[in-house]
Image: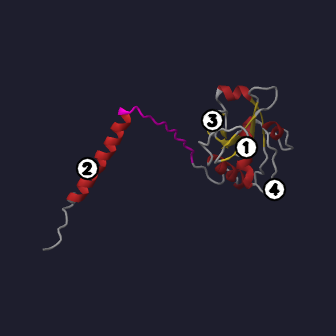
Amino acid sequence: MGVRFPLEGQLPRSLGLNKFFMSFCLGGALLLGICTQASATFRVYTVPATSQAAKPKPAGEVIDRALGALGTPYRWGGTSLSHGFDCSGLVQYAFKTQDDLELPRTSRALSRVDAPTVKRSDLQPGDLLFFRIRSRSVDHVAIYIGEGRFVHAPRRGTKVRIDRLNNAYWQRHFQSAKRVVPTA
């Protein structure tokens, strides 16, 4: 008896049964979720690939580290992926790759760092953005990632996410920006 090979385009009977069984299991799981009113929410973040020429190496390291924290829960005073972040904790975490840069811990103190102030029209990836939300002085900080977007830990009950600077809310609360990472 020889070994039979399927004709082109045909699956061996065992592979066809495997596909059927897998479809049956996935369909059953979906039906179970519907019957038990289970729900899941997924947020997909898309970040267009940018060339290294577009983001200098130090700023690229900072941004990559900050983007790696997307979806991490907000936690007041938090400074780690495992426990969560507040806005300045995320900045501390992201800038940890910069050996020669020691940044203060709070958003207000970060806004007072002796670094060049940057106009909105001149923002570059890695620049720090400062906002005044609830007080008379800066009380929120974010990291500009380019193309009018920034990454930050907004507030209790949210997660690290990307927002747009041209959003009316953020435009209204924007105060200033500083460049703490060298551009070359």
Q: How far across and how far down the image is residue 57, in percent?
A: 70, 55
- Mark 3: give few (<14), some (14-19) or many (20+) Cα within 10 Å: some
Earlier residue among tags 3 and 2: 2
What's the residue at 23%, 54% (across, down)? Answer: 16
- Disc 1 marks which residue? 89
Distance, label 3 to label 1, CA atoms, is 18 Å
Left or right of 87, for residue 16: left
What is the magenta range?
Answer: 35-48
Q: Is residue 18 above or below residue 73?
A: below
Main secondary-structure element of the magenta-colored stretch: loop
- Disc 4 marks which residue? 100
Q: Which mark is residue 163?
A: 3
What's the residue at 64%, 29% (across, down)? Answer: 167
Within the magenta stretch, is there residue 7?
Answer: no
What's the residue at 78%, 51% (across, down)? Answer: 182
Q: Which residue type does callout 1 highlight?
A: Gly
Q: Which residue type does callout 4 highlight?
A: Asp
Q: Which residue type does callout 2 highlight?
A: Phe
Earlier residue among tags 4 and 2: 2
- Mark 1: give few (<14), some (14-19) or many (20+) Cα within 10 Å: many
Q: Are marks 4 and 2 in contact (CB under 8 Å)?
A: no
Q: Are marks 2 and 1 in contact (CB under 8 Å)?
A: no
What's the residue at 76%, 51% (across, down)? Answer: 183
Quadrant containing the N terminus in the rendered view: bottom left
Which residue is more in the foreground, 80 or 134?
Answer: 80
Distance, label 4 to label 2, CA atoms, is 59 Å
Nearest to viewer (mark 3 / mark 2): 2
